[in-house]
Amino acid sequence: MGINIYNDEEKKYSKLIEDLKELPKINAPDNFEFQLMTRIQNKNFENAKELKEPFNFIKFFAPSAVVVSVIILFFIFLPGNDTQYENPLMSDPSQITSQIDHKSNLAEDVNSQKVSEDNNVTEPKGPLSSKAYNVTVNPNDAVVRPNEKYPIFRNRSIALDDYISGENQKRNSLQRGNVVKSGDAAPEFDGFFYREEPDQKTIEKYRSMMDSVKRAQAKADSLKRAKKVE
Amino acid sequence: MALNRNLTDLTDEELIKEFQVSNTLDAYEILVKRYKDPLMNFVFRFVGDRDACTDIVQDTMIKFYLNKDSYREFAKFSTWIYTIAGNLAKNELKRRKRRNLFSIDNSDDERSFQIEDKSFLAPDRAADSEIKNEIIQRALLKVKPIYREVVILRDIQGLSYEEIAEITALSIGTVKSRINRGRTQLQKLLKNIYKE
C-alpha cells in the first residue's frame, strides 16, 4: 500500500514529504468500535444516511415564477405606445415633402394645361390626378409659393467655395454675419458677427509691399519706354 | 475462535466478500479494526477537527455496513473505503463553508485553524517538533481541498498514484499535477521552515 521511493519530482519536496510522513498518527478513540456497534445494533443510521429532500415544486418553481411575473409586469406597464411611434430617420421630412408635392402639382397643372390646349381633349385620368385638372393656371397668373421655412437670401449669402478660394473677399459686415446665420426669422435676427480687429502693423506691411511692387512696376515700365525710344 | 483466526488471515477483499455473502459481522468488525485508524488519520488531516473526524469515520463505517453490496470485486477495498470517507469529509467541509457564509458572527471553529503569522514564530520555536507538526497541520488546512486530499493520501497515508487516482476518480496525470501543486502551496505556506 505504501510507496516510499522518491522520484525526481519528489526530491524537490523531500524535506516537506519527510515531515508529512513524520506527523503523528491520529488513532480512533478507544470506544470507537463499541459506539459503532451500538449504533448498528440500535439501527441509529441518521447521520450516515443521505437525507435526500423530496422534490419541492414550490422551491423549484418559485424563482422562475418571480422572473416570469416581473417580465409580464414590465411589458404591461411599459410606458409609451409602439404603434404611435414613428422613426424620424426612416420617414421623409414633412416640410420637404409638402414643398415637393406643391411643386409637382404646379408642374402637373402647367403640363396638363398645355396638353389640353394642344389637343382640346380632356382625358380623365386616375382618381388621384383628377384634382389637377380642376385647377387652371394662366400664364399671367401669379403663382403663390408657400412660405419657405428656411429662406436663403442670395444677396446676403456667399458661396462657400468662393470664400475659401479667396474670391469675393469684399464683403461688408452684414454679409459676414450671414455666413453663420440660421433660423427661420431671418429679418429679425441677423446672425452672429465675428468682428475682426484690423492689425495696423499688418496693414502697413502689406501697404509697403504693394508700394514696392508698384515702384518696381513703374521702373520696369520706364525702362521699357526708354528701350522703345532708343 | 478458529473462525476468527481464519478471518484475520483473510485479505480485505476476501473479508468483504465474506461479509457480503454470509453477512458475517466478524468480517465487518475486522475490516473496521483495520481501517479505523488510517481513516481517522486521513480525515483528521483533511478536516482538522478531531470530533468531526470521529463522526465522519463512524459514518463511513456505517455507510460501509449499509451499502456493502455496492462494493464491486474489481476495486480494492481500501480505495473504496477511502472514497467514502473522502466524500463525507468533503461534505463536512462544504457544510462548514455554508455555515460560515450564513453565520452572523464569524466565530466558527475553522477560524481557529488559520495559520499563524509567520513572523510570530521564532526559529528556535519552529524547530520544536510538536510546534512544527502543528504548523504543518495548520498549513495543510490552508491548502485547497482538491490538492490537500491528494497530498494527504500520497505523503501522509502513503498510497500509490494508482490508488489515489482510483479514490479520487481522476487520471494519474491529474493526480500527479495536483500533488505537485499541493506541495508547492504547502511549501509556500511553510517557507519559514523550509528556507532554501
Image (cartoon, coloured by chain):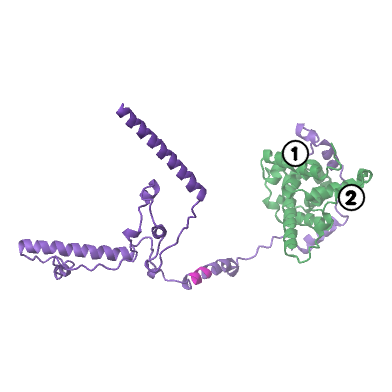
Q: Position of residue A42 (x, y in %)?
A: 78, 64
Pointer 2 indicates a residue of which chain? B
Mark 1 vs 2, N-terminal side? 2
Q: Residue at image x 23%, y 63%?
A: A103
Three-letter amino acid code of the residue under disc 2? Phe
Rendered residue at 41%/38% (across/down): A215
Q: CA distance from mark 1 to mark 2?
A: 37 Å
A42 versus A227 height, above or below: below
**Whole-percent x and y of residue A62?**
58, 69
State the residue position of label 2.
B120
Q: In the image, what residue type sits under mark 1?
A: Ser
Q: Which chain is purple?
A: A
* Letter of the chain shown green in the rendering: B
Q: How many marks?
A: 2
Question: Magenta stretch?
Answer: A70-74
Residue A142: x percent and y percent?
19, 68
Quarter placement of the C terminus of chain A: top left
Say left or right for B11 vs A145.
right
Q: Quadrant for residue A4, please give it.
A: top right
Q: Residues within 10 Å of mark 2 (few under 14, many from 20)?
A: few
Q: Is residue A188 magenta?
A: no
Task: Return the residue found at the far left.
Answer: A120
**Mark on residue B160?**
1
Predominant secondary structure, magenta span: helix
Please determine whether, in this image, residue A203 is positioned above or below residue A213.
Answer: below
Residue at (39, 34) in percent of width and height: A219
Label 1 Cα neighbours within 10 Å, binned few <14 / some 14-19 / many ≥20: some
